């Protein structure tokens, strides 16, 4: 009986994203790739793409956009500490995510949702959107 290798030179991108714990299921990983939320070298990827060590991927999940570099390949989903060893997030990506989180938090605290926004609140919203874009 042949054993399935844990580490493999050829692994599908959707399977690697699942093993690295970016998505809870392979189906979600595949759907994200097909909908254009995963880019490699500035281009959309396909679920069957074979990532290599050193490849850089841009992943959009929810409000966040991460830029990760592949450090190792795996077809097996393991615990979070072991999954984090499969990739490294760039320093710029971490800084952008923290800044975006702070902006969302500040926006959530400053805007009341009681009815229609006033003229002052609309100006603040426009300033927030202009500075973020």
Image (cartoon, grey):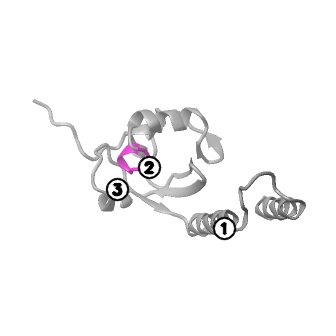
Q: Residue 102: which quarter of the image?
A: bottom right
- Which residue sits at x=71%, y=68%? 110
Q: Give the class, few, some or many, for how many residues have Cα within 10 Å of label 3's Cα (few <14, many ≥20).
A: many
Sequence-wise, which precedes: disc 1 or disc 3?
Answer: 3
Q: Of helix, strand and loop, which mostly describes the magenta segment?
A: loop
Q: Position of residue 23 (x, y in %)?
A: 43, 45
Q: Which residue is mark 2?
A: 22
Part of the protein shown in magenta: 18-23
Sequence-wise, which precedes: disc 2 or disc 3?
Answer: 2
Image height of 49 relative to 115, above or below: above
Q: Residue 28: which quarter of the image?
A: top left
- Which residue sits at x=59%, y=34%? 35
Q: Which residue is mark 3?
A: 83
Q: Position of residue 119 (x, y in %)?
A: 90, 60
Q: Badges 2 and 3: C-beta atoms under 8 Å apart?
A: no
- Which residue sits at x=30%, y=59%? 82
Can you tell which of label 1 and label 3 is closer to the viewer?
A: 1
Is residue 20 one of those drawn in magenta?
A: yes
Q: Secondary structure at mark 3?
A: helix
Q: Give the class, few, some or many, for how many residues have Cα within 10 Å of label 1's Cα (few <14, many ≥20).
A: few
User: How far apart, in angstroms, are the residues tagged by discs 1 and 3?
Assistant: 34 Å
Q: Nearer the viewer, residue 49 or 37?
A: 37
Q: Nearer the viewer, residue 87 or 41?
A: 87
Residue 109 marker: 1
Outermost residue, right side: 119
Q: Badges 1 and 3: C-beta atoms under 8 Å apart?
A: no
Image height of 113 relative to 120, above or below: above
Sequence-wise, which precedes: disc 2 or disc 1?
Answer: 2
**Quadrant position of the C terminus in the picture:** bottom right
Q: Is residue 82 left or right of residue 131?
A: left
């Amino acid at each position: 009986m042949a054993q399935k290798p844990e580490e493999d030179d050829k692994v599908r991108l959707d399977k690697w994203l699942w093993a690295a714990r970016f998505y809870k299921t392979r189906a979600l990983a595949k759907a994200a790739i097909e909908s254009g939320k995963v880019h490699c070298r500035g281009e959309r990827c396909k679920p069957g793409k074979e990532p290599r060590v050193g490849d850089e991927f841009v992943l959009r999940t929810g409000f966040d956009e991460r830029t990760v570099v592949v450090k190792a390949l795996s077809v097996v989903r393991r615990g979070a500490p072991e999954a984090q060893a499969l990739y490294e997030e760039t320093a710029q990506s971490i800084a952008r995510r923290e800044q975006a989180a702070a902006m969302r938090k500040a926006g959530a605290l400053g805007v009341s949702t009681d009815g229609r926004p006033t003229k002052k609140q609309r100006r603040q919203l426009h300033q927030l959107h202009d500075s973020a874009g």
